[in-house]
């Protein structure tokens, strides 16, 4: 089974950029999508009738604010059930979490809030991190979890090109955000699958559109596939697909045999 995560930075934009060819290249059974920037009906309209999607079921969760945030799941495997949000009304207005339960695991795709310029949204981000951890714990108490998405944080200095210049200054690389991911991993016994399999490798999943950052490979690793520790023995491979374009993020995949 192959699972994928991809922040598409606008579902209606990416379908015009060889999206179906990219999906065929990924050959994923379940795909978590973030930042659809569309309402549920617009997501369905954007994907309706596209070649190669006939075998997928689509689920989506949109923000109250139009053209903002939003998540989706494309799956070839019938889920037992799906749900959106983490169950806290004031945190669930932006369509940031979508959950699908399968026989062997819970699958969650998440678009973690950005702390925003000037770190003005960092208090909200810290509140989110705590609430999201409690949500994942509840799922993990039932069966193993695979959590994927744009977590909007570079966890370690190796995960961004210029750590010293960005530390505690730039959204996505403050100590509070780093600690949020650390607690999610350690407190819930989750594993950052790509880093586990590539402990010393430098690779990024997001690049600014400015200054030729992608061509120069000046980026950040913001996109993750986390698994419950007890699933790691079944993981057979992970990959960051740097050369799949269409968004400022690239997809990340996890191969698992259950």
Image (cartoon, rainbow, N blue to C red):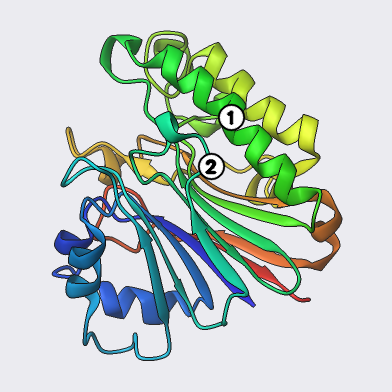
Left or right of 181, for residue 167? left
Q: Is residue 74 visible?
A: yes
In the figure, 162 relative to 239: above or below? above
Please name whichever residue, 64 or 23, is drawn nearer the observer in this view of the structure.
64
Quarter of the figure that contains the N terminus:
bottom right
Q: Secondary structure at mark 2?
A: loop
Residue 200 point in image, percent of width and height: 67, 39
10 Å crowding of disc 1: few (<14), some (14-19), many (20+):
some
Identify the residue at horizontal 36%, vertical 46% (top origin).
Answer: 95
Asked if labels 1 and 2 touch by Cβ distance under 8 angstroms, the answer is yes
Left or right of 161, for residue 108? right
* Mark 2 / mark 1, whichever is N-terminal: 2
Residue 57 point in image, percent of width and height: 42, 80
Left or right of 202, for residue 57? left
Identify the residue at horizontal 51%, vertical 64% (top origin).
Answer: 4
Q: Identify the residue position indicated by label 2 in the image.
A: 86
In the figure, 249 relative to 175: above or below? below
The Cα atoms of the two marked residues, 2 and 1, are separated by 8 Å
Residue 7 point in image, percent of width and height: 36, 52
Q: Identify the residue position indicated by label 1 in the image.
A: 131
Identify the residue at horizontal 72%, vertical 64% (top origin).
Answer: 105
Quarter of the figure that contains the C terminus:
bottom right
In the figure, 131 relative to 78: above or below? above
Q: Secondary structure at mark 1?
A: helix
Q: Is residue 18 visible?
A: no
Identify the residue at horizontal 73%, vertical 74% (top origin).
Answer: 103
């Amino acid at each position: 089974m192959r699972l994928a995560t991809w922040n598409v930075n606008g579902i209606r934009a990416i379908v015009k950029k060889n999206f179906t060819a990219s999906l065929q290249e990924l050959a994923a059974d379940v795909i978590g999508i973030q930042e659809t920037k569309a309402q549920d009906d617009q997501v369905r309209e954007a994907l309706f009738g596209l070649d190669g999607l006939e075998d997928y079921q689509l689920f989506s969760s949109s923000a109250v604010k139009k053209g903002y945030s939003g998540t989706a799941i494309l799956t070839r495997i019938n889920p037992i059930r799906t749900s959106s949000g983490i169950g806290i009304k004031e945190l669930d207005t932006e369509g940031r979490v979508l959950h699908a339960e399968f026989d062997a695991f819970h699958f969650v795709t998440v678009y973690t809030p950005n702390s925003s310029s000037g770190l003005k949204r960092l208090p909200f981000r810290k509140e989110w991190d705590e609430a999201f951890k409690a949500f994942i714990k509840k799922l993990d108490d039932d069966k193993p979890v695979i959590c994927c998405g744009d977590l909007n944080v570079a966890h370690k200095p190796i995960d961004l090109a210029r750590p010293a210049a960005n530390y505690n200054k730039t959204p996505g690389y403050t100590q509070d955000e780093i600690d949020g991911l650390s607690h999610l991993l350690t407190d819930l016994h989750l594993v950052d699958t790509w880093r586990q399999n590539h402990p010393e490798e430098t690779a990024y999943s997001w690049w600014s559109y400015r200054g030729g950052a992608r061509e120069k490979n000046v980026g950040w690793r913001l996109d993750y596939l986390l698994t419950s520790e007890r699933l790691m023995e079944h993981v057979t491979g992970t990959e960051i697909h740097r050369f799949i374009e269409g968004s400022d993020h690239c997809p990340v995949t996890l191969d698992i045999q259950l």
